[in-house]
Image (tube, rainbow, N blue to C red):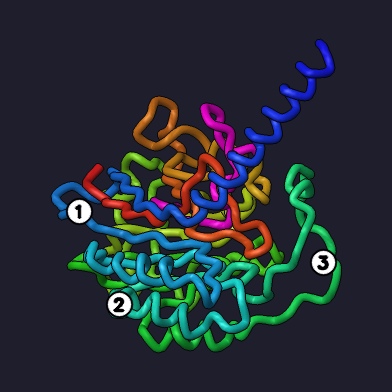
Amino acid sequence: MTGASAAKAAGGLVALAAGALTWSLVEARWYTLREATVPLLPAGHDPLRILHLSDLHLTPSQDRKVAWVRELASLDPHLVVDTGDNWADLESFGPLAHALEPLLERPGVFVMGSNDYVAPQPKNPARYLLPDARTAPPRPPRAMPWRELIRLFRSAGWLDLDNRRGVLDLDGRRVSFVGTDDAHLDRDRFPAAGGPDDARTTPRSPSAASSAAASGVSSDGLSVDLHVGVTHAPYRRVLDAMLADDADLVLAGHTHGGQLAVPGWGALVTNCDLDPSRAKGLHGWPGPRPDAPGGADSTWLHVSAGLGTSPYTPVRFACRPEATLLTLTPA
């Protein structure tokens, strides 16, 4: 290759990299609504709509994201599930409360993520390629006003599922929940079954095809139509515990869908020990989807790619920011 050819090739690579960077900055603000159908309700039930929000990482200047989130209330969900990392700045409480205001009028449940507790810091992105991306912060992290955030959710009547259980009546269905605090910060303590917050008193079939139909019975004698697990970071230990707890559906976030994906391949990392093939979307755990061959012993798992990024790496590539409307139907 001549010097001129080498220079031309180098210039082309620089132009390609610049174009990819520009696109990744645009894509990080190209919000989209995903929709998925999950066949797990007992026979004869009407569909149940769950809006899954995660990883907003909201900053005070993100007016377009605020407006987009507010519009999600028009979907008329029966339940809102917030799987954490709501904000990314100490001044974000007001914009976040405004963004979620219409949704807080709906039944909801929530768990906290690491950035709900501490503000993000600049980090070397290459660390995500390590087996465990968690590293000691370069300086003491700034604490977020997380107690104020919890008060906001609780005052709206949303269930706090941080290492807790709970139950809600949703459109004529009785739904029980089990949740954990953020496993990425090792705050997860799986709540024991049969405790004061446990809505079920009888075990349910581990078969994903029949577990929803074989409803448990709550302590007040009413049937439980669905059992849902909620966590921020989908570490395997948490997913395994929820599978053992007979959760029909598990909802998580944290991964950002890999944030920078390879077109035609997908995510390279998940920022936890979940395999990259499950970095976002609807899957089975630990095997195939429950409605696929070999999935009889799996539970449904939905991982949200989330709506935001760290303010220090405000890019996405082949992985649009998202919220998801899950429509649960009879199995």
In this rendering, the label closer to the viewer, 2 or 1? 2
Q: Earlier in the sequence, mark 3 or mark 2?
A: 2
Instruction: Name the residue carrying label 1.
Output: 47
Between marks 3 and 2, how big is the CA–CA gap? 36 Å
Instruction: Name the residue carrying label 2.
Output: 102
User: Where the C terminus falls, by quadrant?
Assistant: top left
Q: Amino acid at mark 1?
A: Pro
Spot the residue most to the front.
Answer: 4
In the figure, is residue 51 to the left or right of 127? Answer: left
Q: Nearer the viewer, residue 166 or 187?
A: 187
In the figure, is residue 142 to the left or right of 113? Answer: right
Q: Is residue 163 visible?
A: no
Between marks 2 and 1, how big is the CA–CA gap? 22 Å
Boundaries of the magenta span? 246-268
The part of the image, by quadrant, that contains residue 191 is bottom right
Circle 2 sits in a helix, a strand or a loop, which is it?
loop
Q: Residue at (44%, 49%) from the top-left corner?
A: 302
Q: Amino acid at mark 2?
A: Pro
Number of dots carrying numbers? 3
Please tell me how crowded label 1 is: few (under 14), some (14-19), or many (20+) other residues with Cα within 10 Å.
some
Spot the residue most to the top.
Answer: 1
Q: Residue 137 bears which disc, if any?
A: 3
